[in-house]
Image (cartoon, rainbow, N blue to C red):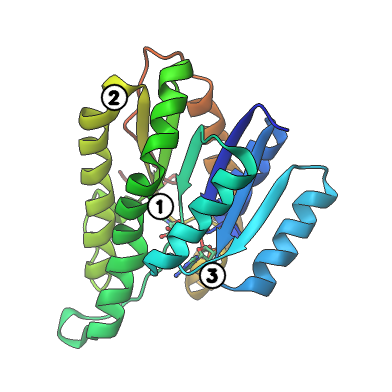
Amino acid sequence: MAARAAIVTGASSGIGLAIARMLGQEGYGLTLAARRPEKLATAAAALEGEGLELQHVAADVGSEDDLKRVVAAHRDRYGRLDVLVNNAGVGFGAPVGETSTKRLDMQLAVNLRAIVILYRECLDLLKAAGAEHRNALVVNTSSISGKFGQPWLSVYSATKHGVVGFTQAMNKELGADGIKSCALCPAFVDTDMTEFVKESVPAEQMIQPEDIAEAVRYLTKLSPACVIPEIMFTRPGDGL
Ligand SMILES: NC(=O)c1ccc[n+]([C@@H]2O[C@H](COP(=O)([O-])OP(=O)(O)OC[C@H]3O[C@@H](n4cnc5c(N)ncnc54)[C@H](OP(=O)(O)O)[C@@H]3O)[C@@H](O)[C@H]2O)c1
C-alpha cells in the first residue's frame, strides 16, 4: 500500500491526467474521478500499465452524491488523503445576454460548488494528514480567467475567480491545521478543452499539461513553512 494518497478529479484527460501520472510516479496511491466512465477507464488502464497504484470512480462532480461516493471509495481503499486535486471543469462561451441558465448552473456546480463540497467531505482526512506531516495539499484548477475576467467567458471567469477566492480563504482557515491550498491559473493549455481555438493558436504554442504537473510536483515538495497560494502560467506574448 502506498505511503501517501491523492484524489484527482477530471483525471481522464488533459491537466488532470498529467497531474495524476506525476503523483502516481511520486508514489501516491490514486483515486481518479471523471464524468464519462469509458474515457476514465481507458486513462486508468494506461496509468496502471505504467505500474501506478490506482482506482477509478466515474462521477459527475456536479452531483453531491457522486462526490460522496468518490470520497468513500478513496477512504475505503487508502484510509488517508495527502493531496486533493480539484481539477474537473467546464467552460461555455456566450455573450452575457445569451447565457442559458442550464449552462450557468452547470459551470457553477462543476467549477465551484464541487470544490466546496470536496473540501468539506475530505476535511477529516486532510486534517489527519496535516497533523501528521504539516503538508496536506489541496490544488484547485482555476484559470487565467480567474485573475482577469474574459469577455464571452464571463460565467467561466466568475467561477474561476471564485476558485481563487475560496483558495485564499482556505489558506487562512486551514493553514494552522497543516493544510495548504494553491489555485493554478493557466492561460491556454494544450488539452481537449482548447480544441476550439487550435486553428488560430497552434497546440505547440500552448502550455503543456506536463508544465502544470511539474508545478504540482514542486508544491508537494515544499517545506511545511512555505505556502504558494496561486500560480499563474502565461505564454510569451500573452502580455501578462
Ligand atoms: N485547457 C486550458 O486552456 C485551461 C486553461 C485554464 C484552466 N483550465 C482548467 O483546467 C481543468 C482541466 O481542463 P483540461 O484543459 O485538462 O480539459 P479536459 O482535457 O477537457 O479535461 C477536463 C476533465 O474534467 C472532467 N469533467 C468535466 N466535467 C465533469 C463533471 N461534471 N464531472 C466530473 N468530471 C468532469 C472531464 O471528464 P469528461 O471528459 O468525462 O467530462 C475531464 O477529465 C478545468 O478546470 C479547466 O477549466 C484549462
Count neighbours of disc 3 (C-alpha within 10 A) and say few if under 14, some if 14 to 19, many if 20 or more.
Answer: some
- Residue at numbered disc 2: 175
Foreground of the two, 193 or 104? 104
- Kind of residue sitting beneath label 1: Ala
Foreground of the two, 81 or 236? 81
Occupied quadrant, residue 166: top left
The answer to whether residue 231 of the structure is visible from this angle is no
Task: Give the mark, 2 or 3, whose residue is nearer the N terminus.
Answer: 3
Count neighbours of disc 2 (C-alpha within 10 A) and say few if under 14, some if 14 to 19, many if 20 or more.
Answer: some
Mark 1 near mark 3, Cβ–Cβ under 8 Å?
no
Task: Give the mark, 2 or 1, whose residue is nearer the N terminus.
Answer: 2
- Kind of residue sitting beneath label 3: Arg
Q: Quadrant of the C terminus?
A: top left
- Kind of residue sitting beneath label 2: Gly
Disc 3, ligand 1: is the CB inside 8 Å? Answer: yes
Helix, strand or loop at disc 2?
Answer: helix
Helix, strand or loop at disc 3?
Answer: loop
Question: Label 2 vs label 3: CA separation?
Answer: 31 Å
- Residue at numbered disc 1: 187
Relative to 27, is 174 on the left or the right? left
Q: Position of residue 104 (x, y in %)?
A: 25, 76
Foreground of the two, 200 or 100? 100
Q: Quadrant of the N terminus?
A: top right
Q: Residue at left 44%, top 60%?
A: 67
Question: Taking 89 as reference, is 216 above or below it?
Answer: above
- Residue at numbered disc 3: 35
Disc 1, ligand 1: is the CB inside 8 Å? Answer: yes
Foreground of the two, 36 or 21? 36
Q: Position of residue 56 (x, y in %)?
A: 65, 57
